[in-house]
């Protein structure tokens, strides 16, 4: 629809050449001339649309993470448990990249947020539960699938709570164990035990898996605070010691990936309760 606007003007031939400080309205009142108007057409400004092709970039990483979770389920059905555990870790890496890429390229969208949440449910909720059940929990009968369901339900509730509390919760901390970390905890134990690097009897492995699944499922819906790492800004300079620490982590991971990754996520999985205990003791000391 074409838009018009009125612009006032008077007969300037009747105006003297002096007193140029007078406004157009002043001259109209002095001469008794009503201001007539000329109509000027305004060309409508079309909004500049962002190139939609760039939105494919973060969603492509989310799709890759979803594929890795589905690939883990397929390999668990084929009794390739080590590959299934590695696929869950690959999904963890891809899930951590899609959000950062969306923020770096300024391509955040409501669709991307919901798609990422659904992909997380598959990759870090359903996939770890089914892989753990096929690997060891089914030997426990009813207790095995109850532990797997506890984990899966905890992941669903954790993601739902995260979606509704994005504007309330402190950005520096997660409320409850993040589902990617919980999935990595499950996959790390499966990878470590399946690789024959865990000095535990075979009869005890299902019960250890039971404890990890229940612990991870309940911790995801707890109120314990876990450090999110979102306060770190990779664009700023860091001390030289941080670079050396990162180098040591890469060396440890490359030397013994299942043991190092499982150890890292075990420490992270209990860090929320350590923070809670420290804050509780500090408040008791100050009161």
Image (cartoon, grey):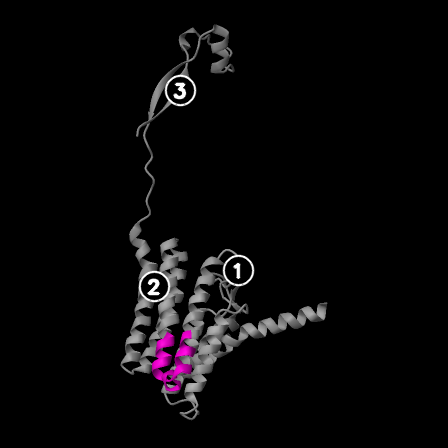
Q: Residue 169 — which label?
A: 1
Give how far apart the Cα atoms at labels 3 and 1 are.
52 Å
Q: Is residue 145 left or right of residue 78?
A: right
Instruction: Tell me: residue 247, above or below residue 167.
Output: below
Q: Is residue 120 left or right of residue 266?
A: left
Q: Residue 62 — which label?
A: 2
Q: Which residues are magenta?
A: 128-149
Q: Is residue 88 magenta?
A: no
Q: Earlier in the sequence, mark 3 or mark 2?
A: 3
Instruction: Tell me: residue 66, above or below residue 18.
Output: below
Q: Picture quarter containing residue 281?
A: bottom right
Q: Which residue is mark 3?
A: 7
Q: Give the foreground label among 1 and 2.
A: 1
Give how far apart the Cα atoms at labels 3 and 2 are.
53 Å
Q: Nearer the viewer, residue 192 or 164?
A: 164
Q: Is residue 230 visible?
A: yes
Expressed as whole percent of the image width and height from the top left, the position of residue 204 reads 44, 90
Q: Picture quarter containing residue 68?
A: bottom left
The residue positioned 46% from the left and 73% from the top of the image is: 217
Expressed as whole percent of the image width and height from the top left, the position of residue 196 reads 38, 90
The residue positioned 63% from the left and 70% from the top of the image is: 279
Q: Nearer the viewer, residue 4 or 231?
A: 4
Mark 3 lies on a secondary structure that is: strand
């Amino acid at each position: 629809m074409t838009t018009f606007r009125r612009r006032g003007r008077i007969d300037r031939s009747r105006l003297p050449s002096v007193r140029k400080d007078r406004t157009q309205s002043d001259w109209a009142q002095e001469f008794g001339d009503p201001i007539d108007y000329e109509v000027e057409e305004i060309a409508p400004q079309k909004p500049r649309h962002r190139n939609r092709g760039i939105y494919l970039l973060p969603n492509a990483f989310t799709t890759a993470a979803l594929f890795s979770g589905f690939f883990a389920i397929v390999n668990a059905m084929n009794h390739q448990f080590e590959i299934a555990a590695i696929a869950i870790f690959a999904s963890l890496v891809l899930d951590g990249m899609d959000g950062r890429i969306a923020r770096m390229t300024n391509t955040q969208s409501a669709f991307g947020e919901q798609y990422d949440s659904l992909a997380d449910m598959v990759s870090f909720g359903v996939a770890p539960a089914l892989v753990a059940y096929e690997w060891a929990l089914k030997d426990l009968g009813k207790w095995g699938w109850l532990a797997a369901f506890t984990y899966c339900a905890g992941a669903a509730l954790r993601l739902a709570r995260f979606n509704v509390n994005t504007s309330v919760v402190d950005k520096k901390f997660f409320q409850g164990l993040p589902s990617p970390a919980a999935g990595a905890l499950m996959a790390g134990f499966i990878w470590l035990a399946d690789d024959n690097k865990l000095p535990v009897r075979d009869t005890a492995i299902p019960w250890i898996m039971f404890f990890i699944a229940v612990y991870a499922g309940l911790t995801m819906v707890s109120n314990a605070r876990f450090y999110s790492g979102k306060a770190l800004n990779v664009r700023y300079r860091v001390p030289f010691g941080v670079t050396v620490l990162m180098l040591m982590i890469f060396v440890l991971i490359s030397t013994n990936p299942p043991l190092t990754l499982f150890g890292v996520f075990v420490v992270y999985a209990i860090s929320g309760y350590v923070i809670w205990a420290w804050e509780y003791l500090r408040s008791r000391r100050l009161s």
